[in-house]
Amino acid sequence: MSMDLSEFLDVFLEECFEGLEVMESGLLNLDAGTDLEEINTIFRAAHSIKGGSAAFGFEHISGFTHVMETLLDELRNGSRQVDKETVDLLLASVDLLKEMVEGLADDQAPEEQRVAELQTALENALKTDSPVTGDGTAGDQSSLPEETPEVSTWQIRFAPGPDLYREGDDPLRIFQALAELGELSVTTDSGQLPSLDEMDPTTCYLQWEATLKGKISEEQIHEAFSWVETSSHLEIHPLDSAPAPTPTATVAPPDPAPSPTGEKKPVAAVRETKTSRESSSIRVSIEKVDLLINLVGELVITQSMLNQVGASLVQQGGPASEALLTGLAQLERNTRELQENMLQIRMLPISVAFNRFPRLVRDLCNKMGKKVDLVLTGEQTEVDKTVLEKIGDPLVHLVRNSLDHGLETPEARKAAGKPEQGRLELSAQHESGNIVIRISDDGAGLNRKKILEKALENGLVSDKEELSGERIDNLIFQPGFSTADKVSDLSGRGVGMDVVKRNINDLGGTVSIHSQEGQGSTVVIRLPLTLAILDGQLAAVGEDTYILPLISIVESLQIRQENLQRLAGATELYRFRDEYIPIIRLNELLGNAGGTDDLEQGLLVVVEAEGQHVGLFVDRLLGQQQVVIKSLETNFQQLDGVSGATILGDGRVALILDIPGLIHLFHMKSNPPAALAAAS
Amino acid sequence: MNSDTVQKTDADMQPEQGTDQYLTFCLAGEEYGVNILKVQEIRGWSEVTPMPNTPDCVLGVINLRGTVVPIIELRSHFGLPATDRGPTTVVIVVKAEDSEGVQRTVGMVVDAVSEVHNIMTTDIQPAPEIGDAAQRPAVAGLATMGERMIILLDVDELIVHGVLSLTGDKTAA
């Protein structure tokens, strides 16, 4: 083949990875019980990988997959029982196959020895209770799903029972279904029709004769009649004498390898499900989607600009103001819908991130001798692709932590009066415009005493501080923190939880842990659904408008003099519920001239970040709105305390504040010597 | 070479072999030039949204048809005395490219734009090794137009290393 296939290589690789994922999850499900559809799915995935790699000339992959496929075929046709050894062997093969495909992507030669070893293991498995079918035939059979029925002409005689109409069936619909299959011509036989005075209008006296031409199998025709077949007389004959008509013959595939009719039946069903899935979606590069989302973002800005102009025009009382307002309202509705649907395109179910966990948990449990029941819920919850890609690693880390530190060994659990098998639950759900992921286990929970000791030792807290239990638990997210007695290869090196936290913060989300000693712990991750837009609270400081992420706002309040406190004359504190929170004057911190300095004139917005509350002092609050996030890095660079910018309805640019960054900036400014000492 | 074309320095003239077109502008009485291929557009002065913790020369950002574009005050960047913005004050929007090929759109506030000159590459003299060492790389060379001297600026160098690195240092400290 002289055709240049390299441009399709990326698509092939992508399909390979998808196929491998399907195989892996399918194999894990096989552990539970044998489901023929599950085996079929695995088999199909293996088969596409084999076919694709053979087309590209990757013989090492197609050869290896072929042996796997043979083994799978035996499982499929029931000549071999599904047992743990076979599944383990196949799982190992999937892993190796993944490496081989990855090797193609980075142009690395696969490790031939390991491939050979595993291939021999597979072959040996095939030889031990050897089944009836040999290698060769199994391979040939597997190529059958690709075949299509030949062009043929069918003669159909349909004589329905008299109750056809009374049973609610409509022959017209049946013929319409047939017409979709191919070229259809129908003649009605009204010979049975009685004279008008004898006729019962609800009885069917008619019979039909039809010829149908096209690439159609007999079952397809039977399917069209499936509702009426029992009560009717139906004759279907192939018209073999009719020569294949010339126009359709040219459309037929160039090599319609004749297939034994006997095997067509089960295979056709497999093929149908496959094609229907493929045709229901298209592959589009993510850049194209992002470009569209950006354009819609522009549209939203223009629309809100028009709204403001329109509102001021209407106030002046123009002649067509009523119509203008209606039009603008319509535009706003359409724009919003367009934006929502556009963002929906980028959304993927969280199961994409969850899928790896059954395997991970299984492997880790085997390694550590623990028994854990993994429960996944809300896998269909949808989240932005970028969020999804970035949440994977933090989730892996948290799950590993739960397995390593949280859940105990079966013996320890028994001693504590708990069931031997631990429970690890991963759940996802939508909550007020955010996605909330919970990772909960019924393990030992956090040891607060140990955490506090460690925190004192590392100087994260001073012994004077009175900390709530919740606050202590969340200390584990501080940098350089680990209470694990010994370092394992899973976790406990003290890097980790802070990285998890930082990754989640970078996505504009928050993370916290709730734990009860002896009962287990739950990590709650709250993430925005998308990185493209943000629910913002507009706040005025001086002449400028800033946007605070709504997700981090706890409460906004008017300052009462009696709750004010000064710490050593410098930092101002405010009594908020049971704690004293520092007041950050935004106009000072952001170097914003103007803005009131009188605390009683403005408002205090209590925000939460990194497990602590601070109060941001602003002049006043404006509205809340969804804003389109624009990166400052595109044309400038990242700034401390600012996560991005957006364009307001009047065309002005407003900065979106980054709460953890602001707090950091505040500490640097109010306490420079200490900050320097901590850094050195 | 035709003697007519040497004297005519119109903007709509096609540059000849070995010639580059420069957009010149005034800044505190001095004349500067930037390669016209780097210029995206020239627009009037409009109010900016200030950004915290940026050098004084970074005035803030504006909305340029949906894109957030930073605005640099060139006078302040070159240490020239500040002045009120008059009717001729404009923003030259340029595209600066860093060493990795990433393009940034940045606006530069100048006193006034003058004209477009064709300048032969051979007529450009290297910048003298005196003056502010930090600013020197931003000067691509000097050209003489009759009586006047034009300071030709390297936009990439000016924006990427001149302005952006200032902000980087400050936030890192």
Image (cartoon, coloured by chain):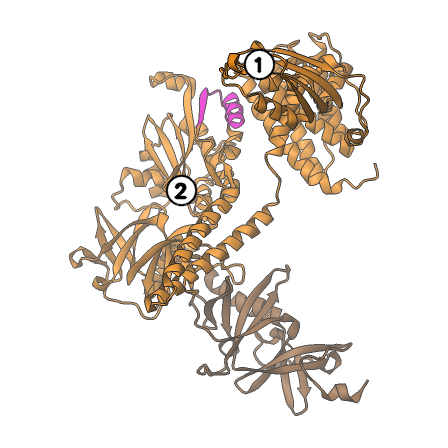
Residue under the image location 21 percent in, 57 percent down: A559
The correct choice, above or below, for A91 with respect to A503 in the image is: above
Residue found 73% across the figure and 83% down from its top: B123
Q: Position of residue B147 (x, y in %)?
A: 65, 92
* B18 or A611: nearer the viewer: B18
**Kind of residue at disc 1:** Tyr
Rendering coords of residue A298 (x, y %): 50, 57
* Alpha carbon distance from label 2 to label 1: 62 Å
User: Residues in magenta?
Assistant: A358-376
The residue positioned 66% from the left and 26% from the top of the image is A181
SS for callout 1: loop
Q: Find residue A538 and report its image quarter.
A: bottom left
Determine the residue positioned at 44% across, 70% down.
B48
Residue under circle 1? Answer: A205
Q: Secondary structure at mark 2?
A: strand
Q: Amino acid at mark 2?
A: Asn
Question: Nearer the N terminus, badge 2 or badge 1?
Answer: 1
The numbered dot on residue A434 is: 2
| Outermost residue, right side | A2
Q: Is residue A27 at least partly visible in the picture?
A: yes
Chain A pictured colour? orange
**Residues at badges 2 and 1 in contact (C-beta under 8 Å)?**
no
Residue farthest left in this picture:
A562
Rendering coords of residue A20 (x, y %):
63, 29
Q: Is residue B17 left or right of residue A544?
A: right
Instruction: Name above or below for residue A421 compared with residue A558.
Output: above
| Chain in brown (letter) | B
Camera-side mark, 2 or 1: 1
Which corner quadrant of the image does residue A663 belong to? bottom left
Chain designation of label 2: A
